[in-house]
Image (cartoon, rainbow, N blue to C red):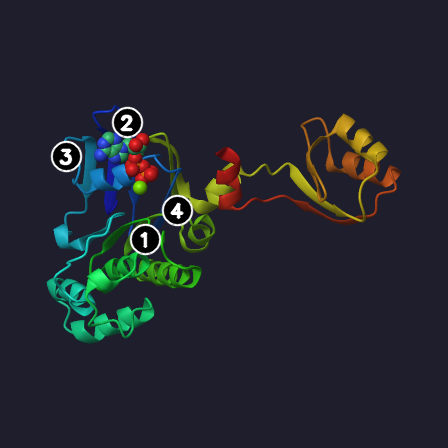
Amino acid sequence: MSVLKVENLSYHYESGEGIRNISFEVEYGDCLALIGKSGAGKSTLMNTILGILPKAEGAVLVDDSLDIRDISFSPQNQAIDWYLDVFDNVYLEALFDGSENGKAETLAVLEKIGLGGKEKEDPTNLSGGQLQRVQLARQLVSKAKILMLDEPTSSLDVITSENILNHLSSQCEDGKICIISSHDLDMLEKYCNKVLYIDNGELVFFGGIDRFLKTYNHLNEYKIEHAGQLMEKAKKSIGQTFKVSEWNPLMVEIQEEQSLNMLLKLLIEQDIEIHSVEQNSRSLKEIIQLKG
Ligand SMILES: Nc1ncnc2c1ncn2[C@@H]1O[C@H](COP(=O)(O)OP(=O)(O)O)[C@@H](O)[C@H]1O
Ligand SMILES: [Mg+2]
């Protein structure tokens, strides 16, 4: 069985909103991107998996060898121990997890996350972004095998976000599991291997990121770079036969009864100087934007 298996999980708020019938499973080594618009149900799903929202329907099955300390969660809203300084907020997590080298690990993580020098700071003096880093630092020192992070990079700068995702994905390569919800789709595409896409509380897609891109890319769409601007006459003639979504560069969807050769022949007849032809492939971010 998988390390974490979610079966037909549903949770309804009194308003009627929530999540419906979500199923997926992850193995050690998986870095799962949890994506969907604001209000799609990402936080609800995480909170339901963790049992923070009780009375859910469905099942969450976890490998027998794991206990509660093997799962660590960074909620969307800050969970800071306000009476402890920055160092102790992180060090405590390392201690809870039985780290032998907790002090050194805490210092190293604070440095990595851009809080070097802030160890003695009282959290009430920190900015929102700095508080988010403290919370993340706790996860980075944790020995948990499954890390769940709800929008960990939402108030961080690009460089710190990249450092963190890089760190998390290398932990996955070492055999952990990360489940990360975020709107940084380019970054998720770079660092995650699986996607769980939810919309309106329902699962739209779960599987490998490669399969997601393949499924939602129109592979019959071509991008053609050409010289100069197209004349109205040429546009008319191309537009009559082909489905064009953009003119410069030219983006054309080839329908079933058509071929790329037919298109190229037409372009040559119109004296269009072709620079390059490539099958279009969209990024995760472009696909989600188009679907939204
Ligand atoms: N405590 C709550 N009570 C009632 N409805 C809620 C509550 N929290 C979230 N919702 C609703 O449930 C839906 C999913 O919310 P949420 O899981 O927070 O989405 P996301 O994390 O993807 O932005 C939204 O329509 C939201 O308004
Ligand atoms: Mg949320």
**Label 1 packing within 10 angstroms: few (<14), some (14-19), many (20+):** many
Which is more N-terminal, label 2 or label 4?
2
- SS at badge 1: loop
Mark 2, residue position = 17
Q: Can you tell me which quadrant of the image ligand 1 is in?
A: top left
Marks 2 and 3 sit apart, C-alpha to C-alpha, by 15 Å
Q: Earlier in the sequence, mark 4 or mark 3?
A: 3
Instruction: State the image coordinates of residue 7 (x, y, percent, origin top left).
Output: 25, 33
For disc 3, the neighbor class at 10 Å (few under 14, some 14 to 19, many from 20) is few
Say whether residue 42 is visible: no
Closer to the eye: label 4 or 1: 1
Picture layout, residue 49 above or below residue 161: above
Label ID, residue 54: 3
Whether the residue carrying mark 3 lies under 8 Å from ligand 1 is answered with no
Seen at 79% across and 39% down, the residue is 264
> Residue 74 location, x and y as percent?
24, 52
Q: Would you name the residue on which mark 1 appears?
A: 152
